[in-house]
Amino acid sequence: MKKISVRTRVLTGTLAAAALAATVGAVSASAETSETPAALAAVKVDTQNKNLAQSTGLTLDSATRAAQATLDAAAKAGQHVSVAVVDRDGVTRVLLKGDGAGPQSPESAQRKAFTAVSWNAPTSELTKRLTQAPTLKDIPGTLFLAGGAPVQSKGAPVAAIGVAGAPSGDLDEQFAQAGVAALAK
Amino acid sequence: MKKISVRTRVLTGTLAAAALAATVGAVSASAETSETPAALAAVKVDTQNKNLAQSTGLTLDSATRAAQATLDAAAKAGQHVSVAVVDRDGVTRVLLKGDGAGPQSPESAQRKAFTAVSWNAPTSELTKRLTQAPTLKDIPGTLFLAGGAPVQSKGAPVAAIGVAGAPSGDLDEQFAQAGVAALAK
Amino acid sequence: MKKISVRTRVLTGTLAAAALAATVGAVSASAETSETPAALAAVKVDTQNKNLAQSTGLTLDSATRAAQATLDAAAKAGQHVSVAVVDRDGVTRVLLKGDGAGPQSPESAQRKAFTAVSWNAPTSELTKRLTQAPTLKDIPGTLFLAGGAPVQSKGAPVAAIGVAGAPSGDLDEQFAQAGVAALAK
Amino acid sequence: MKKISVRTRVLTGTLAAAALAATVGAVSASAETSETPAALAAVKVDTQNKNLAQSTGLTLDSATRAAQATLDAAAKAGQHVSVAVVDRDGVTRVLLKGDGAGPQSPESAQRKAFTAVSWNAPTSELTKRLTQAPTLKDIPGTLFLAGGAPVQSKGAPVAAIGVAGAPSGDLDEQFAQAGVAALAK
Amino acid sequence: MKKISVRTRVLTGTLAAAALAATVGAVSASAETSETPAALAAVKVDTQNKNLAQSTGLTLDSATRAAQATLDAAAKAGQHVSVAVVDRDGVTRVLLKGDGAGPQSPESAQRKAFTAVSWNAPTSELTKRLTQAPTLKDIPGTLFLAGGAPVQSKGAPVAAIGVAGAPSGDLDEQFAQAGVAALAK
Amino acid sequence: MKKISVRTRVLTGTLAAAALAATVGAVSASAETSETPAALAAVKVDTQNKNLAQSTGLTLDSATRAAQATLDAAAKAGQHVSVAVVDRDGVTRVLLKGDGAGPQSPESAQRKAFTAVSWNAPTSELTKRLTQAPTLKDIPGTLFLAGGAPVQSKGAPVAAIGVAGAPSGDLDEQFAQAGVAALAK
Amino acid sequence: MKKISVRTRVLTGTLAAAALAATVGAVSASAETSETPAALAAVKVDTQNKNLAQSTGLTLDSATRAAQATLDAAAKAGQHVSVAVVDRDGVTRVLLKGDGAGPQSPESAQRKAFTAVSWNAPTSELTKRLTQAPTLKDIPGTLFLAGGAPVQSKGAPVAAIGVAGAPSGDLDEQFAQAGVAALAK
Amino acid sequence: MKKISVRTRVLTGTLAAAALAATVGAVSASAETSETPAALAAVKVDTQNKNLAQSTGLTLDSATRAAQATLDAAAKAGQHVSVAVVDRDGVTRVLLKGDGAGPQSPESAQRKAFTAVSWNAPTSELTKRLTQAPTLKDIPGTLFLAGGAPVQSKGAPVAAIGVAGAPSGDLDEQFAQAGVAALAK
């Protein structure tokens, strides 16, 4: 696409928007929308490919399946836990508060997952780093307590699973790892 | 990679962990770098491809360039503004508080960008939807005020630019659109 | 259980605590598991039945199934949404951020569910109440936007499902209702 | 109730809703409500029993009585404290800020109660666990300081009492235990 | 007390502190305290009376009684509500979450009480002011919804009671007023 | 005042309100108010004296003077600091951000003052208590760092001054004590 | 200063730091500091002037004087208010909570000042803009209610004064303007 | 400017405002504004110079250049980091979330920069101070972890750069120092 001035872009974009309106379907359709296409036009110009990067994450189906496997492992051990699955950006994809799990467990699970995906390591390991860098744990959003495990693709973190509620963090992490393992099957 | 049972994995990992304890060190160790594969075995199992989805975003270089083009357009118009670029998840990639821009402008810019990427439309258009659904604006993180513009790839939102600080939201959005346009060049 | 005076209880507990200190250990001990009853004596006195009330909620299995049915309905309609299931106390039991759902959708879904369970009515109906009581929507935690539906048992609210991400709140609520319906099967 | 389609359910539900309207009384009655029954119908279908779980908590009368007994014990000891009673979900049922109690005491009391109910143990005991798991105290909402005591029914936590404001946490917890004891009488 | 230099004050204050230690009793006593009196001395100098102002508030006993009267009125009307009593500074003295009251009700009750004490008027009246000053309701901490009633002494606000959970704010406020009335008996 | 029913109270109160309306003056006057006296009546009944307690605080004039004396002491020592004066409830009465004082200093000063008034002791002393009760510092709103000094009347805390910004907390506290001393003159 | 490599810079900086240590005095002095100069060196290189911009603000003395003049005007009118002075960045320099001013007044005053400095206009005027851009008031930190007045230097905003607590915003703003006027004397 | 009464000031200011309206241009112009000049007048009186102080900061261009140099240094070392530049008031001027940098890195970078500018020292040095004053790290907004470096002008802090995301804080700080060094060229 050649360089276009802002003003020209608006007109061009109008056409593009009109074309899109017929094809995009549900995503851009809106019952409330009655604006003229021209108003929308300017931003319908597509970004050039050279500006784009791809990132990898779990589908929600997979994330849910992993969370379920986590809960199954906990149930088998007779433990009541909550589980969270976060994506590479630390955003929660799945949060399940277990039957009988304490009120502290959902946020604890989320933070363990956030921590695991941030450093691409299980939180049981990360906790050891506090010996030399004790203030790592003051970084907002983190929880340096066993129970978080990263999900990796080609060695890079693409998600993480966090678990909380069992009597020890090691148990929590064992269940999180069961969830990770379910994604390798 | 072969399927492994949860129980086997735990045992393997346990041994690895014991070995690890003596060798990993702490601060300088990084999940990407030097720990032995066995040590983190349980979580190093790569996720199957079928579980993965790709998402598209801007490189930081592109996002910064777009933000700069936004500021250039504002400067040409003699306006002092702040600009934010967020990704598809609403996470801020770039935030620049302009010289002379008011203290309200950075968060205003971020929220406009967040809003634009959430509904894949410029906020000037989204504001019109409030006539029929006035409580849309109560959704946390949003700001239904002109000045936000989505960045699209194949019609889908991959980022958004938000601007605040000019005397009117329409001017803010004109600058945001200049930033979007810079990505189409 | 016989009535005990505060003073006696304190003394008893003191002895037990002394004994406990040597045996319990810490991390692995769990109130549900292995400490000696005497140890926690002071607080282990069971509450009298007359002090207790029962409340009803969904099992996590049911909540998850309802959320899944919600997502299935959305998928059938070609929509990308997030779904939340909250209990009678407004606490999130299930949160699923859909593939391709916008970043505003998870908290929007949670708040719709919170609102629906608070007033035991779908949010599409509750929104109408704003005509007469417009400041209802300023109550913290709420979102008066279609998309939330209560789950009832004998007419009382026991949970709620909230959905966000479709082009209109009416669509969101249709999916939420599909989730509720799955619990009636 | 047999499986019904979403559309059928709406009609069926309408009838159910109409029936409910006459019997439910105060809970669903609303001075502001004028919506047609049909609109509300879909969500009036009752959840199946198999989806439901019961949880146990204190009545407000009991919780208030326990809080009062706590304050009485503090007054007898000449101490100015605040007291909180939370339910199993960590939600505050009763909060009383004592005459002369410091401004830090209400939230301190709430957090101690939250902590006690989360792990079903008095906070004086839980504090000891920090020796082996020092980051437990970083879990949001918690306070690992003596003064919180769980209320149990058949060994399971159904509530907790937290106290703050006395010169030592041990004194605080003694008063909290007096509150728990009042529920055993 | 004559003017003293900071240095002199320390020595003088030491003596004062020593004297205080014997008489103040519980308030300043602390099991953890082992600092030398000298260290504490400087701040033990009493403020001159001319610097002081008296403010009036409810005793906790009275506030609790008012809250109970509020709940009794609600129970008589068959309504499930939460009630809050705040002091002149808007600080919560009493918070009771009623059996069966929705999860939105405690904070709603607190904010209504906060609003009523801030403007020394029932919130049903204050809501009317929004016609002319609609942004009053944007002041943090407030809720302009019927259900809050100030407690006055000589016409000045000394506390307020807020109620939430009934089908209408007018009902909520009727119960709040019953609580206020209990203080006039 | 004899016991009156809620309904009777309304009528009685109306008269009281009408009388009050003429005498209260500025506090209750409002340009926006046009509600009928009857509506307001119920809450105009004055609380009985037996329900009331007096609390002591600084006048704003005194608090400002103390803050100024604090800054003067800092200026004399060539230090750039911020100062806060809080009342017995921990509410900020005065906050002054000094020229050249760092951005962390205002909230640091507030929290030191909050901590000092909460425990009626200078924060330099309170910090020592962490040796035995290290989690005291996790109580929300507190900062266990030298620089806070309580203001007392008859040994009880009525306010506190907090200072932050000097190279050491001991210096900060010396300035705070100068502020306290100014109130003893 | 010529371009230097990072490594060279460290060495050079060390010398600069050593020199600075003797001259800077109080600002950088710290009782706790014992780090070697080399560690600190790299960041002691002074920024080039071409990178710098000057901004204008009030001295704390002036800001305090303006706040006092504001309170004097309110006192003359028999009103109880709180006052805030913020700088161009919206940061609070002075906050005074008036005797008898309501608990909502300090934050209300701060937000009015924040709003006035953000748009360089009194909030009474800014409120009128809501007619055409009603969502302006959703920008975080703002309050579009009369009572805020900017302080200008050469027409540009350098600070603002916010007042809250009087029966009407117009009165509040009159007092704020009295504070501004005091700076013109 | 001579002392003027508030009332006189209004009239005088009106003229000043009218004059300003023609000259100020974009900054004060607003498409939404239709208020009468008189209303605005009172606050258009310029502050006297004696009330003003100048503060020094980076231009956005310089801050952006420094951030870019920081990222270049990180890229050269093969590290994925985020970078923040804050001004003397701790306000973020530039925030860039690096490609592949973890979700914890932006806020971590901001806090390191905030900490460095607050104490005018690199955070690697400040962390050492925790040995003697461990609660320094509890000051809100701070993060005592290597990776923050102040930008100085004549020895005083005018900004700071914070970096997060590398395997160690020392690496982070090395990149931050590269950013600072770019400002010395």
Image: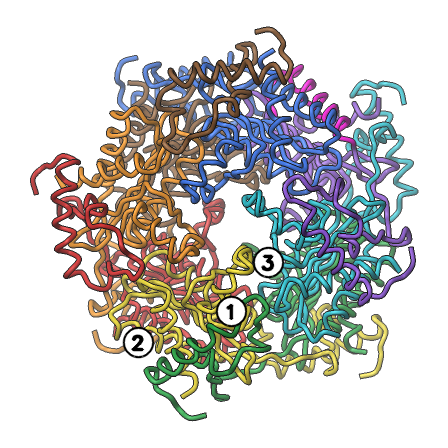
Chain colours: A cyan, B purple, C green, D yellow, E red, F orange, G brown, H blue
* Residue F74 makes an appearance in the image: yes
Point 30% across, 12% down: residue: H1
Query: Marks 3 and 1, Cα distance to the nearest angstrom?
Result: 14 Å
To which residue does mark 3 refer?
C142
| Foreground residue among D104 and F56 | D104
Q: Do residues under tags 3 and 1 come within 8 Å of each other at their CB atoms?
A: no
Q: Position of residue H174 (x, y in %)?
A: 62, 26
Mark 3 Cα shell of 10 Å, populated few (<14), some (14-19), many (≥20): many
Query: Marks 1 and 2, Cα distance to the nearest angstrom?
Result: 30 Å
Q: Residue furthest top?
A: G2
Residue E165, disc: 1
* Residue C174 makes an appearance in the image: no
Write down the quadrant of residue D73 in the picture.
Answer: bottom left
Q: Do residues under tags 2 and 3 come within 8 Å of each other at their CB atoms?
A: no
Q: Answer whether residue D48 is magenta in the image.
A: no
Amino acid at the residue labelled 2: Asp
Point 43% across, 25% down: residue: H40
| Foreground residue among C111 and A100 | A100
Q: Which residues are magenta?
A: B59-81
In the figure, C164 relative to G62: above or below?
below
Q: Chain of mark 1?
A: E
Amino acid at the residue labelled 1: Gly
Amino acid at the residue labelled 3: Thr
Mark 2 Cα shell of 10 Å, populated few (<14), some (14-19), many (≥20): some
Mark 1 Cα shell of 10 Å, populated few (<14), some (14-19), many (≥20): many
Residue D72, disc: 2
Residue E110, disc: none
Query: Secondary structure of the magenta portion, mostly?
Result: helix
| Foreground residue among G29 and C155 | G29
- Secondary structure found at label 3: loop
